Structure formats: C-alpha cells, structure tokens
Amino acid sequence: MNQHPDPPPWPLYRANRDRLIALVRPLGATAATQSVPLTPDWSIADVTAHLCGLNADIAAGVRVGLGSSERTRNQVRTRADRSVAQICEEWIAHTDALRDAMDDDPFFGHRIAADLTVHLQDVQHAVGMPIDRDDPATRCAAHTYGSVVTDLLNERAGISLQVRLSDGTAFAPSSGTGPCDLTVRTTPFDYLRTVTGRRSYREALALDWEGDPHRALDDICPYGPLRDVDAGI
C-alpha cells in the first residue's frame, strides 16, 4: 500500500531553501530575536542555523544521529555568533554536497526535504505569511512521513495505522499483512502538521479517524508528545 510517487527531492529542497533564504535574509538582526511559535525555543535565526547545520553535517558525511536533540542543539549553538546572512551564505555553500547526497539516496533526500518544508511553514507562520497547503513539497513531505510514522508507530506501540490522504495516496506499516487497527483520513498538510508535533492532542483527535486514536496519539510524533495548546494552523 505504501506509495511514494514523488519527484526527485533535490528540486523540491532547492526551491524551498531559496524561499526561506529570501524570507529570512532581509530580516537582519531581527531574525535573532523574533521567536517561532511552533518551535518556541528557537528564533528565526536558530531555525535557519539548524537547517544550515544539517547541510554541513551531511556534507561532512554524518548520517548517524541526524535529527537527535544533541546534534540539533550543536547545529544551532555553533552558529549563534553569526548573522542570519552569514548562515544563509554557508547554507548555499553546501549545495553540491547536499544535491549529491539526495541523488545518491532519494528516500533520505525526501526526509531532509520534508524537514525543510515543515520549518519553512513554521517561519511563514511566525511572520504572518500565507502558507501554501497543497504545493508539491507539502504533499511529498506528507508521503515521506506516511511511511516513517506508520512503521514507527507499529514498532513503538504495536499499532497498525493506515493513512489515507486526500491526494489519493495511502500508507500502512511495511511489515503488515492483515487489516489495520486504525485508519486516519486527512489532507497531506493536516497530516504533516500533526505527525511533526505542530498540532495539539485535541487538534489531532479532530481528524477523521476510524477506530480509537487515543493510544496511537501518544506515539504518533517521532519527536515527542503533541502540543498542549492548539496551533491554529
């Protein structure tokens, strides 16, 4: 059932990288003080530093530990004394290495592109910009998390989740053979915001579920519990 009929990840990533850089570079010093409500420990500059640092780690050949709290904190901390313009310049300098890594391993590339898509939406929300909820990058990111989350939920909690998205794609655990315990039907945007921890428990419950989602929601986000406060987007 798992489907990933998506374009190569690099063009999606490059387009969103350029959008984010065009958004944050003109902010100047404000980027270091303006908070991002959906990543409340970070400023806009911190988000940019994480994304740049992820590129730097990939360029250095790092694969183990990417996405861990320790690695992510280090990406931000080591760029704390730089301007957002300097961070953007470093990010662009890693272009060739990142493109090669994505071409070599497209699924890995889609995971990196999905991370950028989520953070771009966070920053757009922080500055009051409209968010395109149905662009190709959002759909591809939801597809990537469709595969990741269904397998993770099965491993963590023994729950077989079927995801049916409004663009016609569907996902279930790769090891599953029988009927699923639980089904969710939603849009790619709503699914992506939920499973990346940007939605509250209450907002997640409001999705279209077949079966009781309560136990699944404790483990549906790879990065920790869902929010206590509604995100509103």
Image (spheres, rainbow, N blue to C red):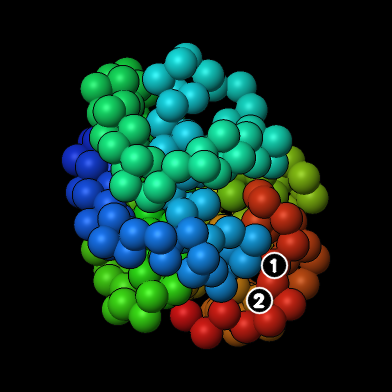
Q: Dot 2, crowdedness within 10 Å: few (<14), some or many (≥20)? A: some
Q: Nearer the viewer, residue 32 or 39?
A: 32
Q: Residue sitting at 33 percent across and 64 percent down?
A: 27
In the drawing, does residue 103 fall left or right of residue 192? left
> Is residue 25 in view from this perspective?
yes
Among numbered discs 2 and 1, the one appearing first in the sequence = 2
Q: Nearer the viewer, residue 205 or 44?
A: 44
Give the vertical position of 12 relative to 99 (above or below).
Answer: below
Report whether 168 appears left or right of 190: left
Percent from the top left, x then y, of residue 51? 44, 43
SS label for mark 2: loop
Kind of residue indicated by mark 1? Leu
What is the three-letter code of the residue carrying label 2?
Ser
Label 2 close to label 1 by CB (< 8 Å): yes
| Residue drawn 65% across the image and 61% down it | 41
Q: Report the residue at 66% width, 49% height from top.
A: 222
Q: Quadrant of residue 69?
A: top right
Whole-percent x and y of residue 155? 73, 41
> What kind of element bears circle 1?
loop
Which one is nearer the viewer's eye here, 112 or 186?
Answer: 112
Indicate which disc residue 141 carries: none
Disc sitting over residue 226 in the figure: 1
Q: Quick one: label 1, few (<14), some, or many (20+) residues within 10 Å?
A: many
x and y percent of residue 135 in the render? 24, 63
Q: Locate residue 94 relative to residue 180 in the image: left or right.
A: left
Residue 172 appears at what percent x and percent y? 54, 50
> Seen in the image, is 233 located left or right of residue 136?
right
Write down the residue under mark 2. Answer: 200
Q: What's the residue at 34%, 40% (across, down)?
A: 86
Disc 2 from disc 1: Cα separation: 5 Å
